Image (cartoon, rainbow, N blue to C red):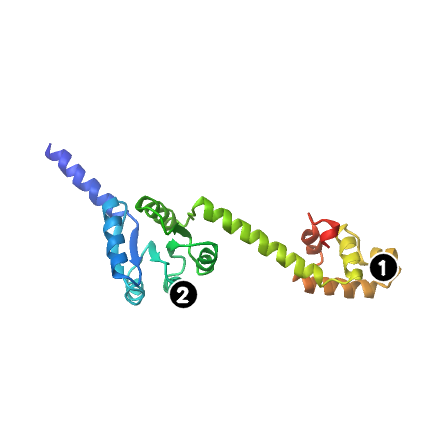
Amino acid sequence: MVWEVLMSADFKEFRRQHQPRLLIVGDVALFREGMRTAMVQTGQFAVVMALSITDALAELRLAEVDVVVLDTSRRRAFGQARQLQAVQPGLGIVAFGVSGVDDALACAQAGVRAFVGEEGSVEQVCHAALLAARGLSACPPDLTAGLLDRFAAISRAGELRANDRLTSREVEIARLVATGMSNKQIARELVISPATVKNHVHAILGKFDLPRRSAIGRQLQGQSASAI
């Protein structure tokens, strides 16, 4: 019986030492304390503290933290996420209270890896924090769908802006480049000089912001002729 008690105590100590170190950050004291109590009760984390952003930045300079749960219900939280990342690059951050795609995008740009919505449960926060502590991401399905739709829209808008800037001759040359033709072959095909083709290719690269000629084909791949 004594041995079992000792083993149990040793296991608990081992588990405590290997639990992710969690820091809770927010402007509202009631949020911080409520979240701290909830996370302690899960038994999954070594909860460091629940602090304001100023105190949290000071704590991060003194001690390593694996993951932060950040209250993002206020707009300035996006800037706070950047501040936290600046002090400890690669820090796992869970954005709690994300209200939509725009907020999620702002968080992602600030280095946030995991998201929990305004109606998120303690279980969801715990799950997201455990993933973020391991360098992984967590995102509610509806928010994931919204983000993917937004990324697709941004991509299409970028393609349209690039295509709108191409002249008819550049469009023609871009299509021929995509087929694998060399500048000399394109020059013979269009009855123009190789130097003129070269100038057009450089213009296309600049408008698409591409690093090299071979990238033109990849840029146009999958696009319909009407999109160009």
Is residue 145 found left or right of 172 in the rendered image?
left
Q: Nearer the viewer, residue 91 or 93?
A: 93
**Residue 24, image quadrant:** bottom left
**Residue 5, image quadrant:** top left
Whole-percent x, y for residue 99 in the image: 41, 54
Q: Nearer the viewer, residue 18 or 146?
A: 146
Whole-percent x, y for residue 176 in the image: 79, 53
Q: Nearer the viewer, residue 134 or 49?
A: 49
- Circles 2, 1 touching at the beta carbon (< 8 Å): no
Q: Residue furthest left?
A: 2
Q: Is residue 150 above or below residue 204?
A: above
Residue drawn where x is 77% and y is 61% of the image: 170
Is residue 163 found left or right of 55 in the rendered image?
right
Is residue 87 found left or right of 161 in the rendered image?
left
Identify residue type, mark 1. Answer: Ala
Q: Nearer the viewer, residue 172 or 216?
A: 172
Whole-percent x, y for residue 107 in the image: 43, 58
Residue drawn where x is 27% and y is 53% of the image: 35
Closer to the camera: disc 2 or disc 1? 2
Residue drawn where x is 25% and y is 56% of the image: 48
Is residue 14 found left or right of 107 in the rendered image?
left
Q: Residues within 10 Å of mark 1 (few under 14, many from 20)?
A: some
Q: Which residue is mark 1?
A: 187
Q: Which quadrant of the rendered structure holds the N terminus?
A: top left
Identify residue type, mark 2. Answer: Gly
Q: What is the C-alpha distance between the residues marked 2 and 1?
A: 52 Å
Whole-percent x, y for residue 54 in the image: 30, 67
Residue 79's mark?
2
Q: Residue furthest top?
A: 1
Q: Earlier in the sequence, mark 2 or mark 1?
A: 2
Would residue 94 be visible to someone looking at this image? no
Instruction: Count the labels in the image.
Output: 2
